[in-house]
Amino acid sequence: MEKFTTHTGRAVPLRRSNVDTDQIIPAHWLKKVTRSGFEDGLFEAWRKDESFVLNLPERQGASVLVAGPEFGTGSSREHAVWALQNYGFQAVVSSRFADIFRGNSLKNGLLTVVLPQETVEALWALTEADPTAEITVDLEAREVRAEGITAPFELDDNVRWRLLNGLDDISITLQNEADVAAFEAKRPSFKPRTLPVV
Amino acid sequence: MGRTLAEKVWDDHVVRRAEGEPDLLYIDLHLLHEVTSPQAFDGLRLAGRPVRRTDLTIATEDHNTPTLDIDKPIADPVSRVQLETLRKNAEEFGVRIHSLGDVEQGVVHVVGPQLGLTQPGMTVVCGDSHTSTHGAFGALAFGIGTSQVEHVLATQTLPLAPFKTMAITVEGELPEGVTAKDLILAVIAKIGTGGGQGYVLEYRGSAIRSLSMEARMTICNMSIEAGARAGMIAPDRTTFDYLQGRPHAPQGEDWDAAVAYWETLATDEDAVFDAEVFIDAAELTPFVTWGTNPGQGAPLGANVPNPEDFADPQERIAAENALKYMGLEAGTPLREVKVDAVFVGSCTNGRIEDLRAAAAVLDGRRIAEGVRMLVVPGSVRVALQAVEEGLDKVFTAAGAEWRHAGCSMCLGMNPDQLAPGERCASTSNRNFEGRQGKGGRTHLVSPQVAAATALVGRLAAPADLTDNVAVEV
């Protein structure tokens, strides 16, 4: 996973709630067997509309998505996170994220920041009025900053530590392999197996 | 203080608990399918890691599989590559797989329970949000992303953030014609698509106790549509009876030991839930969705709502967008909404009971002119059972198409899709924009409502039918 410390960039204000992962990346894109090449599928249906915010010239190169509540609901597809990252987003701000999407994002170094809806509204107002306005997402200080806005956010210490250092979850777990083996030795015999015992 | 079902299952799977770290949980069963696993296997290869427990892992092909001409090569080259990738990965890493054409193939959440692999008190994961289905057995079951799939393949564990508990208590008797699907759609409309966020839901109360395992699976399946981490139902005699004799159910002394353990899992009387929701079963009616998220639903007897009636500005905008996308006008009675297609199937409603329910409504009748109806069994086993009971003949005689098993039109990754603008009454779980095909419009319904709708050509319940003629609305 790539490290995330702090990021400053222009924003895409997305005034929609319940942006589900089928909108973020439609199912037909999920046939790909790689983690890259999803950028053209991001919000594919909405991008057919020229006036969709992502298509506006002043939003090109923006890297912080500011979205409505319940962002990332629906399918567990991690492709949604990859599509946002492949497109160039480094952080997503919303008042509420769906659990699985949030977990996926933090495992890939896409920082999802929860801020109160009033702050999201303020960020929308700022970045709609001035498309060149920049937003800083500072993980070290756990703070989002923009002109006239300073908003602290919460993030679990352990998750933050892994993001700041770009640590791989699997390697961390494998350091505790002895605990896993000890647990396995005590599992009841009635638990099912998918393969015959050899 | 007592513990809830979810807390008991969690506690029994903690491999490691340390200050400042998420609990590391052991995973009893890992289900795989072709869509969310290729990148995880790539990760293992890159790091030179094996699958730790191939004997707790099983793969099936479902999302991409065609439901016609399954004996011919898969026409879509990209789908074919994805299925071939799963087959190669399964072979290379020693994972059991049920491929297209195999008698145990089917939708992953139908296959696990029917094999008896899903049992009470287990932890079950899959790279698919509808893994919540398995909670119907009193298992803690949840969908995970591909990074977590790789983590489970490599370690058979997952580090997990703590959850909160919510009781959804449904007391009373479901009225005639009201099903588990109507109940869960009503729950989601009540608590919202984010209402379950951070919670494991436990469905309880007399109405839940009286449900079959199939109906319980329908309910737990859609827990994710309320944003929940998982949904669970305490195991009881219904659960044990369903399991006994299945290929992977415990046998002999193991069975006795297992049942003794399973009986300890129910939520203690003095346990406290973090949140509680109460529903009176008697007040429920057939329920359908009118919008583009599963929380945008209403009783079939209601009208399409007016966005201006929503107090919350976000909900109002969402309703406006939804009506525009769905091509609906506020105030239209839902029973007047005409459909082009009907889909019966999916991990929500693709089990034998669902097919029986739809067939019972269709028996001896013809679907409306101009309506296309697809019936897609959830697994090959379900299909075989349906054929044995003659249900396939009921469907085809009514004018419906009887297809092979798979996810099919639930998400349109295979050729089964809606055309732009087409409207479908669907027994699946998501009415998102474009979910069943670009520009397609989805109304989520029960199998009974799906069948009645196919007959009438408009959203309808079986009670609206007289012989083959719909009662005027």
Image (spheres, coloured by chain):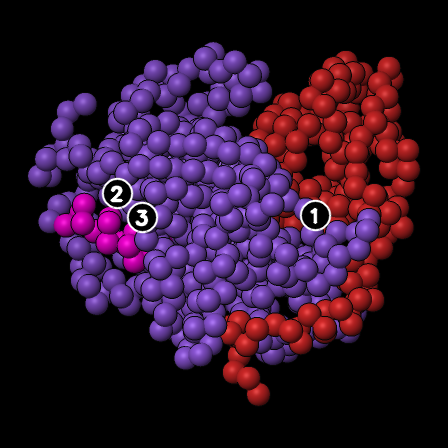
Chain colours: A red, B purple
**Disc 3 to disc 2, C-alpha distance:** 19 Å
Q: Is residue B160 above or below residue B450?
A: below
Dot 1: element: loop
Image quarter for residue A52? top right
Dot 3 crowding, Cα within 10 Å, few <14, some 14–19, many 20+: some
- Taking the spot 75% from the left edge, 51% from the top edge, the residue there is B22
Q: Quadrant of the N terminus of chain B?
A: top right
Q: Which residue is mark 2?
A: B448
Tell me if label 1 and label 3 are in contact, CB under 8 Å: no
Q: Which residue is mark 3?
A: B210
The reply to the same-chain question for discs 3 and 2 is: yes
Dot 3: element: loop
Q: Position of residue B111 (x, y in %)?
A: 43, 64
Counting residues from the start of the chain, the first of labels 2 and 1 encountered is 1
Q: Position of residue B441 (x, y in %)?
A: 41, 34
The reply to the same-chain question for discs 1 and 3 is: yes
The type of residue carrying mark 1 is Ala
Dot 2 crowding, Cα within 10 Å, few <14, some 14–19, many 20+: many
Q: Position of residue B94 (x, y in %)?
A: 60, 78
The reply to the same-chain question for discs 2 and 1 is: yes
- Taking the spot 55% from the left edge, 55% from the top edge, the residue there is B140
Q: Is residue B150 above or below residue A159?
A: below
- Taking the spot 78% from the left edge, 72% from the top edge, the residue there is A178
Relative placement, left or right, of B400 versus B322 is left
Which one is in front, B111 or B411? B111
Relative placement, left or right, of B179 versus A29 is left
Q: Residue furthest left?
A: B467
Stretch in magenta: B349-363
Task: Tell me the mark number nearer the camera, choosing from 3 and 2.
Answer: 3
